[in-house]
Amino acid sequence: MLNQNSTIIVTGGAGYIGSHTIIELLQQTNYNVVSIDNFSNSTAKTFERIEAITGKQVKNLNVDICNLEALELALGKVKDPIGIIHFAAFKSVPQSVGDPLLYYHNNIASLVNILKICKKLSIANFIFSSSCSVYGNVEKLPVTEQTQFSVAESPYAHTKQMGEDIVTNFTKSESKFKSVLLRYFNPVGAHPSGFNGEYPRGRPDNLVPYITQTAAGILQKLTVFGDDYDTRDGSCIRDYIHVSDIADAHVRALNYLIENKQKKATSVFNLGTGVGVSVLEAIGSFEKVTRQKLNYEIGPRRPGDVISIYANNDFVKKELDWTPKYNLDDMMSSAWKWQVHLKDEQ
């Protein structure tokens, strides 16, 4: 472990996975944590929620990471930065299909800038928030870290493929720089306390907040995009994983780098449960654990959606000594607990 003055920078710290990772960092380690978030897709209230859970305040730098000059000015004041966890990116598949230039500019420019900062400030440890979308539609399941990429199904997925290449090539060029690429499958659920969770602005694109908002009466109905896929019930299959399990993996990946346990300059890990769950099965789990009957209908397929994907997570279990703690019912019950908390908060 490092001394108490060492700082971990978390970009997108007010976001869904970023905020849960900050919670784990504060509870599991002695690192100082500094967030960077301009609240383009999040809220400053997240830091009040983090403090309510951990009892600790987190400093946030309200900076657009695509603005290199502002970023350099802000981070030049951070004491002893020894690692960056880079979450900040746009992540909506439908939005990326409709506005690809927005995604290429934001997701790639911000990554290049943050790596320039790593070089300038000699920050040696870097974790990149990637996605299982890099695999595309694959022929063989489950996917391993060696599974070859297919054509990206969306501009969002393509930015993650490009991002991995950028990080890998930069790591090769800097002898003291080390990186981890974490390919998330489908993060869902909320902190077990119910005080922090996914907080989409506007209409959600992801399944679980759509489910909880429909059950809460915020949305009229849920649309299942397609029931004619070649799957066991016709709906898409995903590997849903609890957000706190993903956050815990980030802490382990960070220590993996800092303690020089990595075998390659850039390490790649799948973060999933290893179990494929269909959209209709996820709905069934929610209805079971909450006793809420969900109003949903079957609609047409959605552009950019992969048919079926789930992880082989043997490698990350072995290398990071990481095993998911939460099952599907836990994910759904915590997500509903968070939704109820939001309603009570208003």
Image (cartoon, grey):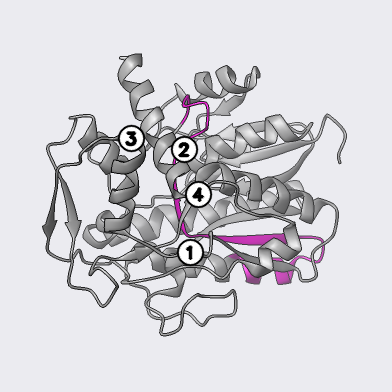
Q: Which mark is residue 275?
A: 1
| Residue sitting nearer the eye, 304 or 27 | 27
Q: Nearer the viewer, mark 1 or mark 2?
A: 1
Give coordinates of residue 52: x percent, y percent: 56, 17
Q: Residues within 10 Å of mark 1 (few under 14, many from 20)?
A: some
Q: Which comes before the other along the chain, label 4 or label 2?
A: 2
Q: Which residue is mark 4?
A: 327
Q: Say what amino acid the circle numbered 3 marks.
A: Thr
The residue at 71%/53% (across/down) is 253
Where is 202 relative to 174, above or below? above
x and y percent of residue 153 in the render? 32, 72
Q: Quadrant of residue 333?
A: top left
Which of labels 3 and 2 is toward the front? 3
Q: Nearer the viewer, mark 4 or mark 2?
A: 4
Residue at the (25%, 62%) spot, across then down: 97
The image shows residue 169, relative to residue 284, as above or below, that is below
| Residue annotated with mark 2 | 15
| Residue at mark 3 to residue at mark 1: CA–CA distance | 22 Å
Element at label 1: loop
Residue topped by disc 3: 290
Marks 4 and 3, the one that precedes in the sequence: 3
- Judge the density around disc 3: few (<14), some (14-19), many (≥20) Cα neighbours within 10 Å: some
Mark 2 residue type: Gly
Magenta residues, as a range? 167-196
Residue type (three-letter) at the residue carrying disc 4: Asn
On the image, the x and y values in percent for residue 74 come to 61, 33
Q: Is residue 242 magenta?
A: no
User: Residue 173: percent from the left, percent from the top?
Assistant: 72, 70
